[in-house]
Amino acid sequence: MATTATAVPRRWRLPYRLQVDRRLEAPRWLSPLVSLGAILVALLLGAVILEIVGGDAVAAYAHIGRAAFGNLGVFSDTLVKATPLILVGLACAVAFQMKLWNIGAEGQFFMGALGASVVVLAPIVPIEAPRWVTIPAMLVAGMAFGALWGAIPGLLKATLRVNEVITTLMLNYVAISLVNFFVFAVWSEGGFQMSPTFQRAAWLPRLADYASQVPLFRGLTTHLGLAFALVAAGVVWYILYRSLWGFEIRLVGDNPRAAHYAGVNIVRNTVLVMMLSGALAGLAGMSEISGVVHRLQTSISPGYGFTGIIIAWLAKLNPLVVAPVSVLFGGLILAGREIQPAGVPRLIQGIILFTLIASEVLLRYRVRLVRVDAEPA
Amino acid sequence: MCWAWAGGLPLAQAWMGKLMVEHPNAAIPAVDANLAVNQNAVEMRGIVKRFPGVLANDHVDFDLRPGEIHALLGENGAGKSTLMSVLAGLYKPEAGSILLHGQPVAFNSPRDAIAHGLGMIHQHFTLVQSQSVTENVLLGLATPRFWLRLPEHDRRVADLGQRFGLSVAPQAKIWQLSVGEQQRVEILKMLYRGVQILVMDEPTAVLAPHEIEGLFATLRSMVAEGKSIVFISHKLNEVMAIADRVTVLRQGRVTAAGVRANETTIPELARLMVGRTVLFDLQKRPQAPGEVVLTVDQVCAENNKGRPALRNFSVTVRAGEIVGVAGVAGNGQAELAEVITGLRRCTSGRLLVHGLEVTNSPPRALIEQGVAHVPEDRTHVGSAPNLTITDNVIMKQYRHAPLAQGWSLNYTTAQAAAETLKTEYQILAPSVKTPARFLSGGNLQRVILARELSVRPQLLIAVQPTRGLDVGAIEGVQRLLLAQREAGAAVLLISEELEEIFALSDRIVVIYEGEVAGEVTEHDPEAIGLMMTGGKRAYAAPAGEGG
Ligand SMILES: Nc1ncnc2c1ncn2[C@@H]1O[C@H](COP(=O)(O)OP(=O)(O)OP(=O)(O)O)[C@@H](O)[C@H]1O
Ligand SMILES: [Mg+2]
């Protein structure tokens, strides 16, 4: 193959070819525009695929819109889905700011759920304890377990230079298996793959709980976890852009050698940032089982931890942008449960990730079509 | 087939030993030697290039004759790199036109420009460290496509190197090469692509004196074959030595267009560059040095490849004293600075600052001890490219009030501090929010100097502090160093510029292969030159006792 290709003269060529040049100056408006464009292209590609397999793309999209944002009720459900996404999105954004590629948010999410469950099921706080004792205890335990799960790859990276991509990825499976073990072997309710339901004091309050005072809230499932997530977004923003620690994180992320030269302790920061990232993902796990599922079971995440990676990138690692992007994705996930053929929103999610990564190239390179014959040799 | 080979054509000619001077590339239409005799190789007319907040080139005219070496001079941030980047297709000008051999051209990319026989070598090299010289030369070419046939190309590269005096082993990997050799690879890359017009941005800034001689020989052999060269430099004596004509830029405008080098003088050029007369007489007041601030005692350290870089090196620096470390590049100077500032482990020996043992302390501890460091590598070590000027100037001070308030960093104070430093150190940038990577080389150096000197250090380790600076700025930095000395700081000045070392130092230590080759207090260039090349026994000065 190869030899003939070099030896045989090529008679025919495409009249155009792509020319790719490195971009030195990227205008400021380009980055959000490219992200938006990536989403649009993804929707378009999704539509094409739907049409090809015989679906009706317009109807499908209209349905997704209605199913996710159509009325207060479904919008509330969208927010419920968005809650863990905001938290894992923040978890990824923090780590990525320091160029720590934590793809273990999924495992840290499971560990957070496990931590919160230990508080209720071990039990660490008695069943009759009031809500204001149980919930904070679950919160702390969930974040601590997540932080621990982040600290392991952090330590390995900082001290032994073990690649964190591999360790965080592998620890996902360990965490999921660990949760499975507790669900099946320790806390199984009558042999089912789920623990007993938590006592009411371990449930995060929902808007619907206040329907007697505010009739508008009737049936709304949005829970206190959303408030945790929004506060977390504010806190992470403060840490990254206003605190001394955030300055160190951004400095290490931009140029580790300069950070070392400026006296920043890179080892310590690697561990701490991974712990913060893990704690945020752990909080997501806690909020999900305490606010939605109310028990520990095996299927608590449709891959939130991985969606968090996409969200962090789409938000360009800005904690305040993570929230609206998560709402968009929350809508897609919600619609996914409703729509036929199922899997369309997942398909679109996948395509968004794909177009997004592809579009990064446009930020760094200028791609043009040039005529071959107009071009000098 | 035919034009797929066009890129390799000039090489084939070179390979056959024929001198096809004016017809290097099939792509250039009618570069007929006879036609082009009186035609400029390059003509830039009315070039305007704006960056947010800066007018980098303001209606600049520039011309380059065939077979000449044309020096482009100007202050830091005058717009030299920008003008040449416009020429090489990296930037698009807002206005103006470019003619190549009389033909109007508009390049869309550096690759376009190279296809027209015009290439630029930037200050920061673009070589793949893990690949061989030949592989780097071939990188990005259309041919060879599948079969590399490396031995054959090795030979071509070697032949090309021989023809222009660029000795470098084709099979060597880039990381094994010195900076000077890497530069030769960059030149080879351009020659291999049949470049007729070569632009070099501050090529001598990174070279040792003997390497500069080699580079000049190469440039001369290139113009002898009819190629034309644009040469950006801040070193006026080099310019006088190599250039046929000189163009001077100041604040984006031309202040002297194509003046013949032999019709001008160094002071005249300096005046054209900075707009005032530059006095090179530094007032160094005699001053009795104070107590010992830095003691380096029998220190050994390894370089990045694990080979010994410092061997029982000892030196002391007292308060109010500048000690110069002279030596040919690569004799352990870089490692010495890193060991003292905590960036590199010393394998044996002791380091004391103010009598306190700081051997292998972390960088942070040394910063708190008042040790400032102007590093050699300003882009990779000294600054964070995507962070703002503000972030870069507070990089070492952010932990202290008034910048730090509890856990918060007060960005308002930081910005105000940065504004002050920007004025005080004459950092040319649209605002303190500009990312460091947009700064011109000299202005980035000023950011680093501002950060390191503004804290009134007790001990200053300055490595090549004036590299890449214009004459006016060099004078400014040297004054700053003397001011530090007068304020009682201990200064260790590591430099390859002997003139700078002579002008500033109270004592001079010569380093050779990681050892102290000798120490002198009087300015004796010959003795130092001898020691720098290893003749240390011939001149055994009483080392150790300085003051
Ligand atoms: N990509 C960019 N974006 C914004 N401003 C820029 C950019 N490149 C250069 N500048 C600005 O344009 C001006 C001219 O810069 P240039 O690099 O051409 O200077 P120079 O003459 O090469 O200086 P030096 O001798 O310091 O290298 C400077 O003020 C610089 O800050
Ligand atoms: Mg420059």
Image (cartoon, rainbow, N blue to C red):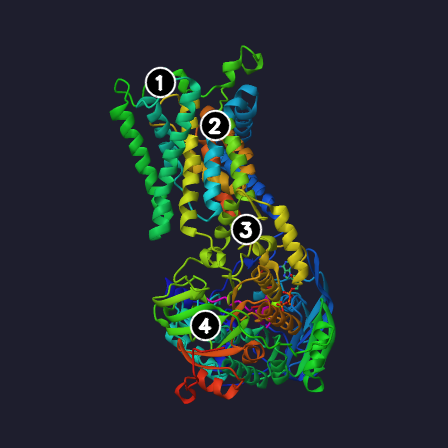
Identify the residue at horizontal 49%, vertical 22% (top origin). Answer: A223
C-alpha span from label 2 to label 1:
21 Å
Relative image position of residue B245 (x, y in whole percent): 68, 81
The amino acid beneath tag 2 is Lys
| Residue holding disc 2 | A81
C-alpha span from label 4 to label 1:
73 Å
Relative image position of residue A267 (x, y in whole percent): 40, 50
| Residue holding disc 3 | B398
The amino acid beneath tag 3 is Tyr
In this rendering, the label closer to the viewer, 4 or 1:
4
Q: Residues within 10 Å of mark 1 (few under 14, many from 20)?
A: some
C-alpha span from label 3 to label 4:
30 Å
Mark 3: C-beta under 8 Å from nearest atom of ligand 1:
no
In this picture, residue B325 sits left or right of residue B412: left
Identify the residue at horizontal 45%, vertical 82% (top origin). Answer: B532
Q: Residues within 10 Å of mark 2 (few under 14, many from 20)?
A: many
> In front: B386, or B534?
B534
In this rendering, the label closer to the viewer, 3 or 1:
3
The amino acid beneath tag 4 is Thr
Mark 2: C-beta under 8 Å from nearest atom of ligand 1:
no
Stretch of the chain drawn in magenta: B112-127
Relative image position of residue A183 (x, y in whole percent): 29, 26
